[in-house]
Image (cartoon, rainbow, N blue to C red):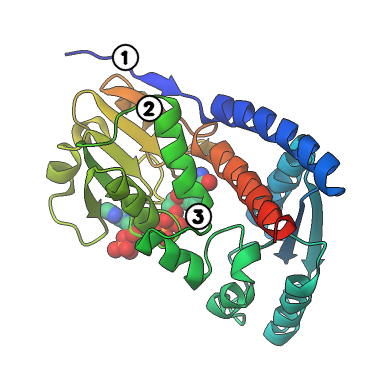
Amino acid sequence: MILVGIIISGKDIAKEKKEVLKNKVSEYINKYGRAPHLTVILIGEDPGSVSYVKGKSKGCLEVGIKNTTLTYPTTIKEEELLNIIRELNNDNEVDGILVQLPLPSHINSSHVINTISPNKDVDGFHPKNVASLYLKESGILPCTPKGIIEVLESASIEIEGKRACVIGRSNIVGLPVSKLLLDKNATVTIAHSKTKNLKEITSTADILIAAVGKPLFVKEDMVKDGAVVIDVGVNRNPETGKLCGDVDFENVKDKASYITKVPGGIGPMTITCLLENTVECYLKHMEE
Ligand code: NAP
């Protein structure tokens, strides 16, 4: 059967969500007298990190969230950084704190994540927020996994009862998105670098999520006819140097019923979920 995969545009969904958020933020400013405030810490000048941080600032500007970006050289000592975070934790005018990862090797990212107040942890990486996800308690959800579920729901894709396969088991994407799919009553298989016969597993999935970090890794022979394919990867195509996903879009698109594209898929949703998380932290803070 030849299918033509419908492209789900994360960019368009994100745009609509940002419009809704912008109106809400403007109401909140009238009600509480100040805008939500996100502080981003950037260490060093890695081009990828600089570009992600710029995207976050732009998103804040679009919806009326105040954004401060604090930049430090890679020579900053861990204790110095932890003290800056502690000050931000105590700053009543800061609602969300995000430290752009990865960090220089002399800084232990767990120490950094654990120091951010769980109530200001807009990335949802603090152990308390991670535990909330696994215990189904209220907490802050990590942005990319939340964005993936919102993309599926916005496209009215049924999750309950479906077979989902997630390629990747990182703490940032693979594991949390698997848990969210499980909570939506999918039957979930998590594949990783030691998985044997990967194709056999992926090609039985109704929903295939690729979070591998390898350019054009998923080919059509790994995809079930009519599957929903969500590409989380952000890579450079080794031949063209252009941004590409983990899924070979051109090769896979006719086999999928729905598919996301890179760029314009999960990336914009991740930023929108970050903005939503910032507003969530702000509201809790203002309503305390
Ligand atoms: P990661 O920490 O490097 O994890 C990659 C996962 O892929 C690991 O679990 C690894 O298995 C698995 N893997 C590697 N090679 C494999 C293979 N040959 N077969 C099956 N599994 C394999 O990466 P990540 O942080 O989860 O990110 C994944 C991708 O998503 C990257 O491209 C990243 O840039 C992108 N990303 C995008 C966003 C966004 O907003 N769009 C956000 C976050 C990440 P092991 O566990 O066995 O090593």
Q: Quadrant of ligand 1?
A: bottom left
Q: Amino acid at mark 1?
A: Val
Respond yes or no on whether mark 2 lies under 8 Å from ligand 1: no
Nearest the viewer among 242 and 79 is 79
Answer few, some or many: residues within 10 Å of disc 2's Cα (few below 14, many 20 plus, some between 14 and 19): many
Tell me: 153 left or right of 112: left
Q: List the residue tagged with mark 1.
A: 4
| Image coords of residue 110 (percent x, y) | 53, 77
Answer few, some or many: residues within 10 Å of disc 3's Cα (few below 14, many 20 plus, some between 14 and 19): many
Rendered-image quadrant of the N terminus: top left
Question: Whole-Å distance between the Cαs marked 3 and 1?
Answer: 31 Å
| Image coords of residue 198 (percent x, y) | 18, 48
Q: Which mark is residue 142?
A: 3
**Which quadrant holds residue 288?**
bottom right
Tell me: 80 left or right of 188: right
| Image coords of residue 66 (percent x, y) | 81, 49
Q: Which mark is residue 259?
A: 2
Residue at 33%, 59% in the rendered image: 169
Could you tell me which secondary element the residue under label 1 belongs to? loop
| Image coords of residue 246 (percent x, y) | 39, 42
Could you tell me which secondary element the residue under label 3 belongs to? loop
Answer few, some or many: residues within 10 Å of disc 1's Cα (few below 14, many 20 plus, some between 14 and 19): some
Q: Which mark is residue 178?
A: none
Could you tell me which secondary element the residue under label 2 belongs to? strand
Question: Whole-Å distance between the Cαs marked 1 and 2?
Answer: 10 Å
Q: Amino acid at mark 2?
A: Ile
Question: Whole-Å distance between the Cαs marked 2 and 3?
Answer: 22 Å
The earlier-in-sequence mark between 1 and 2 is 1
Residue at 38%, 18% in the rendered image: 6
Asked whether residue 261 is in view, the answer is yes
Name above or below for residue 3 compared with residue 205.
Answer: above
